[in-house]
Image (spheres, helix red, strand yellow):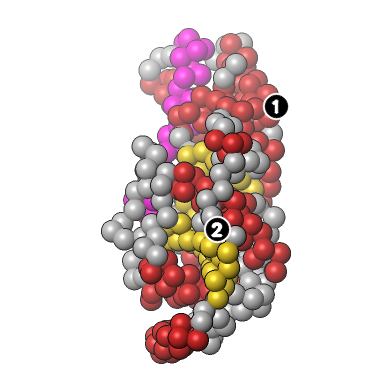
């Protein structure tokens, strides 16, 4: 790993650029300290070339604990007890009361309308409804197409990543960097979580491992200044993707949410049509608490998609249905394990089928 610091001529140019930046975003960006650009050499281990853990494995605990029971419930017949037990099971899997009621009412209506008597066909109707709940298309974001390629606007794509402490945000950013780099994309990471030195160091390590550049300031620096410098560096390097890490903000702290809005404004002034994705990282193990976090962040910065981390570590993966249904925000990725490559594009039909497999 080689570290580059601005030399005198570069510092003078940076000062001029910083002055111009201040003129446009005086309320957002303080005088930036010299940025550290960590240039990481390509470093892909043999282990990184292994296949990513599939979604089917990631939902194993949820399937075994809750959804695996549903097939047996249907086989006992389509009576009132079926719907009562189904409601209890879905709520227990953290699908949420409102979403559960909606799902059951829609399935019941279809069963009645189509005069379904076969339990297997009724189960298929449930699966179809679950897929429909997840298949949210807001026409926002979508920087990763269903075909697996980067679906970016002209020029570079800017991804603002938000989420509370402990959700696996920085790790998820590292996995995304790994995935984009594996597809031949030039990636720059911005260490805008300046509250904790550990967060900056962690992102640098992920950048080194993935072989991508990281732009960072010292702990306590203004996050907007880090973002401005990262976008400037990305433009010079003709990067395809900029992924911005932010502090793990407590969603009950209004001042911290306002700071996040300021970062968003810095991005828009530097790249007018950005951010192209505001990705909220949610911890699948936190259940319905994730719903509250999603609401706050959506109100604050207009979340365009969700990355559901730690899906392999919970038996209550049903929260994904609640998020998509109540907030109308799509899930873009799911974390399927602990390795850098263990990040999967979210596919509603495959996810639902995995919940009922076996």
Left/right placement of residue 113 relative to residue 346 reads left
Please tell me whether mark 1 or mark 2 is closer to you in this view.
Answer: 2
Left/right placement of residue 135 relative to residue 86 reads left
Image quarter in which the N terminus is found: bottom right
Indicate the secondary structure of the residue bearing disc 2.
loop
The vertical placement of 33 against 302, above or below, is: below
Number of residues whose C-alpha sits closer than 10 Å to that of mark 2, classed few (under 14), some (14–19) or many (20 or more)? many
**Pick the front one: 280 or 134:** 280
State which region is magenta.
117-144
Residue 8 picture location, percent across and down: 50, 86
**Pick the front one: 252 or 23:** 23
Please tell me which residue is depicted at 60% across the width and 16% down the height of the picture: 358
Q: Quadrant of residue 343?
A: top right
Indicate the secondary structure of the residue bearing disc 1.
helix
The vertical placement of 342 against 292, above or below, is: above
Residue that badge 2 annotates: 40
**Pick the front one: 312 or 240:** 240
Q: Answer yes or no: is residue 222 visible.
A: yes
In the image, residue 334 lies in the stretch drawn in magenta: no
Residue that badge 1 annotates: 65
Please tell me which residue is depicted at 47% across the width and 10% down the height of the picture: 117
In the image, residue 121 lies in the stretch drawn in magenta: yes
Q: Answer yes or no: is residue 90 visible.
A: no
Left/right placement of residue 90 relative to residue 115 reads right
Residue 210 picture location, percent across and down: 55, 50
């Amino acid at each position: 790993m080689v570290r580059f610091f601005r030399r005198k001529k570069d510092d003078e140019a940076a000062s001029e650029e910083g002055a111009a930046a201040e003129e446009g975003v005086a309320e957002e960006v303080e005088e930036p300290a010299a940025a550290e650009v960590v240039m990481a050499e390509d470093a892909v281990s043999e282990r990184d070339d292994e296949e990513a853990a599939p979604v089917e494995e990631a939902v194993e605990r949820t399937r075994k604990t809750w959804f695996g029971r549903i097939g047996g419930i249907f086989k006992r017949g389509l009576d009132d007890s079926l719907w009562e037990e189904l409601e209890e099971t879905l709520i227990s899997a953290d699908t949420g009361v409102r979403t559960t009621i909606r799902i059951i009412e829609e399935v019941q209506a279809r069963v009645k309308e189509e005069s379904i008597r076969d339990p297997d066909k009724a189960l298929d109707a449930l699966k179809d409804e679950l897929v429909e709940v997840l298949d949210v298309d807001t026409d926002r974001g979508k920087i990763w197409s269903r075909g697996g390629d980067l679906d970016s606007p002209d020029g570079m794509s800017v991804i603002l990543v938000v989420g509370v402490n402990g959700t696996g945000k920085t790790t998820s950013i590292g996995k995304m960097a790994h995935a984009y780099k594996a597809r031949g994309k030039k990636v720059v990471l911005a260490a805008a979580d300046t509250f904790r030195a550990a967060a900056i160091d962690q992102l640098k390590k992920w950048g080194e491992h993935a072989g991508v550049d990281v732009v960072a300031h010292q702990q306590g620096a203004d996050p907007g200044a880090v973002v401005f410098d990262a976008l400037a560096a990305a433009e010079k390097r003709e990067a395809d993707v900029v992924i911005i890490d932010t502090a793990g903000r407590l969603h009950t702290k209004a001042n911290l949410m306002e700071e996040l809005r300021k970062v968003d404004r810095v991005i828009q002034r530097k790249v007018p049509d950005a951010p192209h994705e505001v990705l909220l990282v949610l911890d699948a193990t936190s259940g319905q608490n994730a719903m509250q976090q999603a609401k706050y962040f959506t109100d604050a910065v207009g979340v365009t998609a969700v990355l559901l981390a730690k899906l392999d570590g919970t038996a209550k993966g049903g929260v994904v249905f609640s998020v998509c249904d109540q907030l109308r925000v799509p899930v873009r990725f799911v974390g399927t394990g602990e390795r850098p490559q263990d990040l999967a594009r979210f596919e509603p039909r495959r996810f639902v089928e995995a919940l009922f497999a076996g």
